[in-house]
Image (cartoon, rainbow, N blue to C red):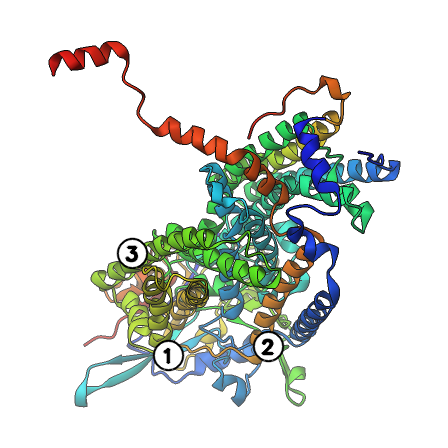
Amino acid sequence: MSRWGMVIDLDRCTGCGACMAACHQENNLPAAGPEESSRDRAFHWLRLLPEVSGSGAEVKVRYVPQPCVHCDDPPCVRVCPVHATYLSEEGIVAQIYSRCIGCRYCMAACPYNAKVFNWYEPEWPGDLKRSTNPDVSLRPKGVVEKCTFCHHRVVKAREETRAAGREMRDGDVTPACAESCPAGAIVFGDLDDPTSRVSEMTRNPRAFRLLADLGTKPKVYYLAERD
Amino acid sequence: MTEADEIQGTTAGLEFEDQDLLRSIEDSGVAFRVVSTLLGLVILTAWVIFGRQILLGLGVTGLNQPVAWGFYIVNFVFFIGISHAGTLISAILRLSQAEWRRPITRMAEVITVVVLAIGAFHPVLDLGRPDRALNIFTAGRLQSPLLWDVSSISAYFTASTVYLYIPMIPDIALLRDRGVRPRWLYTFLAWGWQGTPRQQAVLERAVSILMVLVIPIAISVHTVISYIFAMTLQPGWHSTIFGPYFVVGAIFSGIAALMMVMIVMRRVFHLERYLKQVHFDYLSRLLLIMSLLWIYFTFSEYLTAFFGNEPSEMRVFYYKITGPYAPFFWSMVAANFLVPVGILSFRRTRTIPGIFIASASVVVGMWLERLNIVVPSLANPRLPLPTGYYIPSLVEWVMFAGGFATFMLGFVIFARFFPLISVWEIQEGRKLSVAETTERLEGYLPDPVPSSAAQSATERG
Amino acid sequence: MERQPEPKWIYGLQIASVSMIWVFVLSISLWILHLLRLSRRLNDVPSASIGISIVAIPVFLAGAAILTYVFVGLRRGRTAPSESIIEPEEG
């Protein structure tokens, strides 16, 4: 069984935001209009986290792509009252839209603010709805949703490898963000396979995880910039 | 004729000493209808607005991405806090045999039952999918603090309803014997009470078991509510002091709400003969103690956060102390500490109007405290995200008003059908308590010197 | 003084309401046991679930037991012939 994880090399990342756009496209995230965005209800499963360093004339701003970090000990799963969010066997923190009661306890408990809520029934202006991805379900209003590590692609790859009569292995799945990254900064793969590229990269001395001291054991690693 | 029968016999006639206590039931008048219609209209509006929220989605509130919880959760914690007025205080007063409890306990217990029901409904208002609320019953997970809440609130509701009902049986029987309508209701609820000694013994035993049972349940309720916050890793919430801090705050706001209700009811139903200065005096001393306890807990909580100087904690800390929530934070300190202590410490200001102002100030202050706990922690995420803001929408204000109106209507309807002051306990007190307390007081005094010891004492002298 | 006896249907209603309390309490207990089974199936933290059920179920049962005790006690304690009544208990 694979344990999926991701490494984002900040030395390669240009902060272009292609991952964010691809995620929106792939996962049928409706665009919140200007009014809703101004009320802090813009929707991203993967956001660009602004990181400001330095001071005075030497201010440096950069963007860090941040999806759900898919903790191995997820605080959101512990508090969900109805088992609408859970840790799958492959290490993906998943959300069951049809079971979620919308109490938003998981949002309040997530230290990474990785979850988003459907404040209204999602709107698809014009015939945008016709161009949605058929592999990903559309969410109704009133439920919490989140990054799934492009779980539908994992499912598809599993079916394909089964048809080909072999075990699934590292490299069979690439989520939309990793696929779209022009700089190749996002790498996805099996953390349990010691020979996989992600495993190798996590052993890099530059590797770190967000808020690792909280003990949530995130499976998204970052490689710090070289000086 | 026995003594017990005498009590019943004298009161079942049309005229008796405590008839004032039944006036709200026996001639309710137009005022009841007007007030309940007005309150009903407010409640109806709130339900319509809630229906609209279900149709459109939670977007009609002022909630947003970092601040995912707002007024509904604040009011949930606030109302459940108020509900600690009753059963807990009444049980403690009964347990400590405080004779001055007699005219207070009933009102306290009614507040509990009514407000608890309102508070418990608030999480449903907050659900994105209230149509799926039953998932909690079919697919609930006991490891989630929300389920701890469901079980402890329902236990508290059951216990406090029983605790309201059982000591009310003799009064219901009195209404039945006086032929008050609807007769069948009182006959049904009186459970065949005739006031025989055996029945009295049964009632007394049941009440004394219940009052012991109810205290730990009441404490568990607000502890568990604090756990909703304390069990997360969020800065400002993840604190071991939260359980007792919430319990103290709950009792604090509960006493304040109880005194406000008592003062209003005293005025409306002319209960000056029963609710006297001394009752308010004792309760306001309790309020004063709780205020000092509250400021002690608040001080410990914030000093710990400040001295630790952890960056994410400090963001929340400064958001409250000097940031956007400073007005709310400092008015909370003023309303919960400066005003009540300033008014209630001096005999000259500890008058009924003074106590009313102090209590109202505490109720507002405790609401602000819940706001200060819920919103700032959510508005300051650990990651370098922009600081959130939260402005409640009109919808949330209407629901807030609806909650208050439901409380008032519940109370008014109760007052229409049942006595707000326990008639039989007042009569029992008049009959027995002077002798009983004298006996008890004599028990406190040192025993008389035994004769042999007295001899040796004189010898030594 | 004269006291009208309770009509039969009111007595029936009282019996029904006391039984309803038991139905309520027992179904809550069953619900908690159901959640306990569910938590085992989902591999949840067992201590939290067991702790809650140990506390909650007896509390509900105690509440219903007290109500039943009062109901039965009040019925049994109704006016016996007046000479059988001794001094009422004080306080």
The chain containing the residue under callout 1 comes to B
Is C90 rendered above or below residue B452? below
Q: What amino acid is labelled 3 in the image?
A: Tyr
Q: Give the quarter of the figure containing the C terminus of chain A.
A: bottom left
What is the tally of numbered marks visible in this picture?
Answer: 3
Which residue is denoted by mark 2 in the rendering?
B395
Q: Residue at x 55, y 87 (%)?
A: A33
At which x and y percent is residue A174?
48, 69
Q: CA distance from mark 2 to mark 3?
A: 36 Å
Q: Sequence order check: which comes first, mark 3 or mark 1?
A: 3
Q: Residue at x 40, y 73 (%)?
A: B379
Could one spot residue B195 in this view of the protein?
Answer: no
Dot 1, how many residues are within 10 Å of its Cα: few (below 14), some (14-19), or many (20+)? few
Asked if marks 2 and 1 touch (Cβ < 8 Å), the reply is: no
Q: Quadrant of residue A59?
A: bottom left
Which residue is denoted by mark 3 in the rendering?
B296
Q: Which mark is residue B386?
A: 1
Q: Residue at x 74, y 18 (%)?
A: C83
At which x and y percent is residue B105?
54, 47
Most foreground residue, B54 or B443: B443
Q: Secondary structure at mark 2?
A: helix
Q: Secondary structure at mark 1?
A: loop
Say whether residue B237 is left or right of residue B121: left
Q: Sequence order check: which comes first, mark 2 or mark 3?
A: 3
Asked if marks 2 and 3 touch (Cβ < 8 Å), the reply is: no
Most foreground residue, A93 or B390: B390
Asked if marks 3 and 1 touch (Cβ < 8 Å), the reply is: no
* Residue that sits furthest to the top in the current view: B452
Q: Are marks 3 and 1 on the same chain?
A: yes
Q: CA distance from mark 2 to mark 1?
A: 26 Å
Q: Secondary structure at mark 3?
A: helix
Which numbered mark, 2 or 1, is in the foreground of this view? 2
